[in-house]
Image (spheres, rainbow, N blue to C red):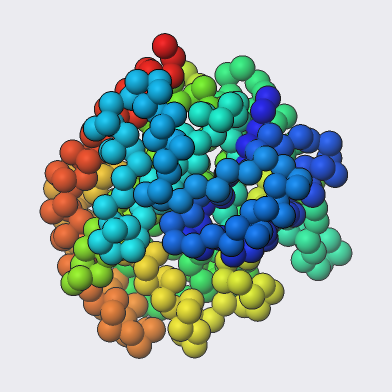
C-alpha cells in the first residue's frame, strides 16, 4: 500500500514533527510514498527542499493549487465543482480556513498523485506514547505506521484511528455550573473526566501492554489512517466558519462527521488503542493552569465556540430533534457560561448563549453548503472512476 503522510497548517515553518514520523517509519521498515503539506498562509520552501532529499513532497497552498485544478480539469471535473472543492472565500475575506477544507485538499492531492493510503497527523503530535512504568510517566516510541497498517490492511477496515496521550484539550477545572457548561457544549463525557481532575490533572496515558483494539465511529483527525478507495462511499471532511460579533470562528468536528457517515456503511473503523503523544499546550510536562495562563484560556474559549458551531449540523446529521436539543442546550449553556465566566474571571464566555443561537440560525446555510460540497465531491470521485 502506497502510504502518504498528510499535514495541515497555517504556516509551514518547521520540520517538526514530520521528521520524527519519517524517522519512525524508517526505523520500523515502512516506506512512505509521499508527504503532503497543505498550508494557508506561508511556507518555508528551504524546509520543503530539505525534506525532498528524503521523500517525495507535495506542498500545496489553499487557493493557489493550480496543478490540482489542472489535473481535475483533465479528468473532466466541472469548473463549478472544482471551485466548490478548492476555493476558500473565508481565507480571502477573513484569513481563516475551515478544518474540513484543509483536510480535503490533502485527500485530493493524495488521490491524484497515486497514494493508496493516507495518514493524517497534527503538527503537535509525535510517534511515541506516554506510559506509566514504576510509578513514573515515561515517553516510549512505538511502531506508529505498523500499528495502523496491521488493521488497515484488512479488507473490511477502511479507517484506523486512536486518541492521544498527553494533557486533554480541556484543562483541569472545577466549579459550580461546570456540568451545565459541558451539557450545553454537548461534551457530556468531558464532565465525567473533569470532576476528578485534581487527581489526574487531565493527563491521559496510553494503555501500553493492556492495549485493547475495538471498532468505533469516533475518528480523530490528528491520528488517523484512511484507505483512499473508501471515499467511493464516504463523504469528504466538512466543517464551517461562522461569525459572532465580527469574529470568524472555526467549527470543530470535521472528523466526527466522517465517523457518523462511516457507521452507515458495512465498512469498519478500528481504534488501534495507540494514543500518540499530544503536546497539547506546547510545554509538557507543565500542568496546564487555565486560570493563570492566558494562552490556555484563549484556546479553551475558541474550542467552546468551535464545539457550539459544530453541534447543530452534527445533530441534524444524526437525525436528532433539532428544536428539542437546542432548547436543552440553551438552558444549560446560559447557566454554564455565567459560571465559567465567573470562575475564569473572563467575560468573553458570556457570549456562548448568543453563539449557540447564531449556530442554530445558520443551520440551513450549513446544510446547503454541505450538500453542494457533497455533489462536487461525488462528481470528482465519479470522474476518477471513469
Q: Is residue 30 above or below residue 170?
A: above
Residue at (42%, 41%) from the top-left corner? 66
Of the pair 189 and 380, the residue shown nearer to us: 380
Q: Is residue 73 visible?
A: yes
Give me the residue at 18% from left, 38% from top: 368
Residue 256 in view here: no
Q: Residue at x 21, y 63 (%)?
A: 243
At horizontal 52% and vertical 74% (from top left) the residue drawn is: 172
In terms of image quadrants, where is residue 357?
Answer: bottom left
Q: Position of residue 310 (x, y in %)?
A: 31, 52
Q: Which quadrant of the figure contains the N terminus?
A: top right
Q: How many marks?
A: 0
**Frontmost residue, 345 versus 221:** 221
Residue 280 lies in what quarter of the image? bottom right
Q: Residue furthest top?
A: 386
Q: Quadrant of the C terminus?
A: top left
Left or right of 214, for residue 317? left
Q: Is residue 23 left or right of residue 352?
A: right
Q: Is residue 77 above or below residue 189?
A: above
Viewer-side residue, 297 vs 381: 381
Between 251 and 139, which is closer to the camera in this rendering? Answer: 251
Q: Position of residue 179 (x, y in %)?
A: 36, 66
Residue 168, position in %: x, y?
Answer: 55, 63
Q: How far across and down, in percent of the image, does residue 119 sit? A: 60, 40
Amino acid at each position: 500500500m502506497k502510504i502518504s503522510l498528510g499535514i495541515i497548517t497555517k504556516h509551514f515553518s518547521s520540520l517538526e514533527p514530520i521528521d520524527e514520523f519519517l524517522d519512525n517509519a524508517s526505523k520500523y521498515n515502512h516506506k512512505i510514498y509521499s508527504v503532503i503539506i497543505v498550508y494557508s498562509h506561508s511556507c518555508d520552501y528551504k524546509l520543503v527542499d530539505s525534506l525532498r532529499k528524503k521523500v517525495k513532497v507535495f506542498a500545496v497552498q489553499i487557493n493557489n493549487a493550480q496543478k490540482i485544478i489542472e489535473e481535475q480539469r483533465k479528468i473532466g471535473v466541472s469548473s463549478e465543482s472544482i471551485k466548490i472543492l478548492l476555493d476558500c472565500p473565508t481565507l480571502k475575506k477573513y484569513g481563516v480556513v475551515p478544518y474540513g477544507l484543509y483536510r480535503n485538499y490533502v485527500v485530493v492531492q493524495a488521490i491524484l498523485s497515486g497514494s493508496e493510503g493516507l495518514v493524517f497527523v497534527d503538527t503537535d503530535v509525535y510517534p511515541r506514547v506516554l506510559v506509566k512504568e514504576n510509578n513514573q510517566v515515561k515517553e516510549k516510541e512505538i511502531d506508529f505506521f505498523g500499528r495502523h497498517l496491521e488493521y488497515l490492511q484488512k479488507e473490511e477496515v477502511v479507517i484506523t484511528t486512536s486518541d492521544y496521550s498527553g494533557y486533554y484539550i480541556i484543562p483541569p477545572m472545577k466549579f459550580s455550573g461546570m456540568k451545565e457548561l459541558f451539557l450545553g457544549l454537548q461534551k457530556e463525557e468531558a464532565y465525567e473526566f473533569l470532576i476528578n481532575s485534581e487527581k489526574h490533572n487531565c493527563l491521559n496515558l496510553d494503555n501500553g501492554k493492556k492495549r485493547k483494539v475495538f471498532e468505533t465511529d469516533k475518528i480523530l483527525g490528528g491520528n488517523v489512517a484512511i484507505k483512499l478507495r473508501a471515499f467511493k462511499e464516504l463523504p469528504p471532511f466538512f466543517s464551517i466558519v461562522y461569525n459572532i460579533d465580527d469574529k470568524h470562528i472555526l467549527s470543530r468536528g470535521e472528523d466526527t462527521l466522517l465517523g457518523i457517515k462511516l457507521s452507515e456503511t458495512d465498512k469498519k473503523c478500528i481504534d488501534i488503542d495507540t494514543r500518540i503523544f499530544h503536546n497539547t499546550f506546547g510545554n509538557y510536562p507543565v500542568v496546564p493552569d487555565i486560570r493563570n495562563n492566558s494562552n490556555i484560556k484563549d484556546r479553551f474559549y475558541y474550542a467552546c465556540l468551535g464545539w457550539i458551531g459544530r453541534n447543530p449540523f452534527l445533530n441534524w446529521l444524526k437525525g436528532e430533534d433539532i428544536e428539542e436539543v437546542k432548547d436543552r442546550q440553551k438552558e444549560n449553556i446560559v447557566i454554564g457560561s455565567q459560571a465559567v465566566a465567573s470562575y475564569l474571571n473572563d467575560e468573553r464566555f458570556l457570549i456562548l448563549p448568543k453563539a449557540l443561537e447564531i449556530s442554530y440560525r445558520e443551520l440551513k446555510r450549513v446544510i446547503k453548503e454541505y450538500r453542494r460540497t457533497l455533489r462536487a465531491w461525488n462528481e470528482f470521485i465519479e470522474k476518477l472512476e471513469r
